[in-house]
Amino acid sequence: MIQALLLGLGLGGILGLVLGIANKEFEVPEDPRFEKLTGLLPGYNCGACGYPGCAGLARAILDKEVDGLPCKPIKPDARTNLKEYLANTPGPDGKTIKLK
């Protein structure tokens, strides 16, 4: 019984260590603009833009899958703020995004 308990604890510790190292080694850095961009969108998650909600559109913009801003319910001043934010804030690669 004690041997089984010690074996389980040892195996769990080793596997936990391997998972911790793998988490650090294979971490994919998130674009820091994603949260701000999602916050600048209206948050209706209506899908009128053709993407699954505002987070999907934000990801598509950051991945440069869209040229313009296909969000239909966004207000004109919010549209201007969003475009200015992207034009003035570089991403992890040092480049900005200019939307039409």
Image: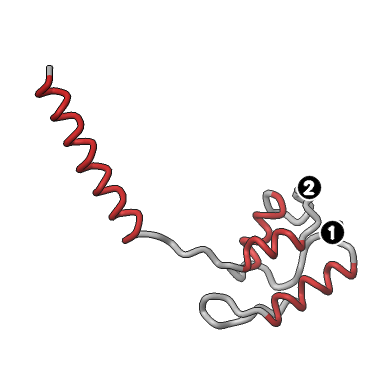
User: Compared with residue 13, is residue 78 higher up or lower down, i.e. above or below?
Assistant: below
Label 2, on which residue? 46
- 55 lies left or right of 69: left
Q: Earlier in the sequence, mark 2 or mark 1?
A: 2
**Quadrant (top left/top right/bottom left/bottom right) for the N terminus:** top left
Report the residue that reaches farthest toward the front.
2
Q: Residue at x 12, y 21 (%)?
A: 2
Q: Residue at x 31, y 51 (%)?
A: 20
Label 1, on which residue? 72
**Does the rendering let one see residue 100?**
no
Label pair 2/1, CB-CB below 8 angstroms: yes
Report the residue that reaches farthest toward the top.
1
Q: Position of residue 28 (x, y in %)?
A: 43, 61
**Quadrant (top left/top right/bottom left/bottom right) for the C terminus:** bottom right
Report the residue that reaches farthest toward the right.
76
Q: Nearer the viewer, residue 8 or 48?
A: 8
Q: Position of residue 35 (x, y in %)?
A: 65, 60
Q: Nearer the viewer, residue 39 or 11?
A: 11
Secondary structure at numbered mark 2: loop
**Does the rendering let one see residue 32?**
yes
Amino acid type at image mark 2: Cys
Q: Residue at x 47, y 65 (%)?
A: 29
Q: Position of residue 55 (x, y in %)?
A: 66, 54
Amino acid type at image mark 1: Lys
Q: Nearer the viewer, residue 90 or 24?
A: 24
Secondary structure at numbered mark 1: loop
